Image: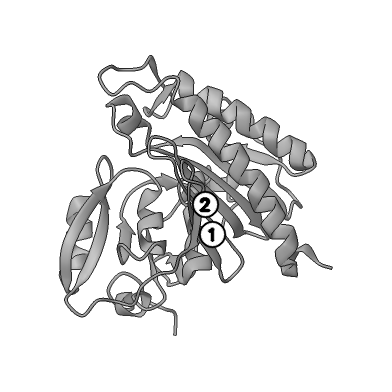
Amino acid sequence: MNKLFDPAYYGALCNMVRRAAIAAGDETLNYFDESGVPETMIKADGSPVTLADHAAEEIIIKALADIDESVPVVAEESVAAGRIPDLAGVTRFWLVDPLDGTKGFISGSGEYCVNIALIENGVPALGVIYAPVVGELFAGYGAETALRYMVDDDQEKDIACRRAPRNGLTVMTTRHHGDVDRLNGYLESLKVEKLLKRSSALKFCAIAFGKADLYIRAGETSEWDSAAGHAILLAAGGNVVDQSGHPLTYGHADRGFRNPDFAAASDDVLPMLDGLFFTRAA
């Protein structure tokens, strides 16, 4: 059976990726200190990186190679070091952010996570996001399988996006990046009940879990920042679109794996953004 339509295959694969994410995330806890600042370096693009980023990435790359060494891995710190696989003619590859929310990690915040996504034909087919400080993991694959797993009590439950609340939307915003003026411009015409600030890809998870409705990112991000969350949202009843209203696609080495501005929301909320955040071609 074609793997694209085999839930059993993806279920087994998801379990293996979950174990890799948990192992990597738990390794970062060895470097995490709520009262101190871990050893930090600055990359060429001006962003911070710690020893925890590298340690977690090493664990993930080895685990993914053990699953199938023929599938290339595009990982944030490897790319920063110039180790970029040739994706020409490649239909399946992994996108990895070993420690998403490094600034929060450095400041002692628990709002960081491990992101692992499988990309097939430019589309996120499977995603896992693990927040090690709270032991919370989100995963999704296909069109319907999205779940939340709490490591400590071994509890797993299905999750789904909620319908747009009548009293207004809960909008996720970022703590450390983005264009605030542009974001406010997008939100002016929407009925917004509250804004929630979060770091990292956990913003996607809040929408998939039915705790929020919308995340608009006006500012620079990379594909490994969004791919896992995108996969989880797709499975939970949402999507991530650009300003043409098209879902984000992945594997754009020609632009340094950079994303355009995007909006992440439930399928119920996305139509509200037509003519506001995006304009579909006639």
Question: For residue 185, which numbered disc appears in the image?
Answer: none
Tell me the SS state at disc 1.
helix
Please, is residue 153 above or below residue 83 in the view?
A: below
Quarter location, residue 119: bottom right
The residue under label 2 is 228
Percent from the top left, x then y, of residue 52? 47, 23
Q: Residues within 10 Å of mark 1 (few under 14, many from 20)?
A: many
Quarter occupied by the C terminus: bottom left
Is 31 situated left or right of 63 in this image? left
**Residue 19 place in picture, x, y as percent:** 61, 40
Spot the residue most to the bottom: 282
Q: What is the CA distance from the residue labelled 1 to the residue labelled 2?
A: 5 Å
In the orientation shown, which residue stands out farthest toward the top? 39
Q: Which residue is mark 1?
A: 231
What residue appears at the point 47 percent right and 72 percent down from the top-left corner?
237
Quarter of the figure that contains the N terminus: bottom right
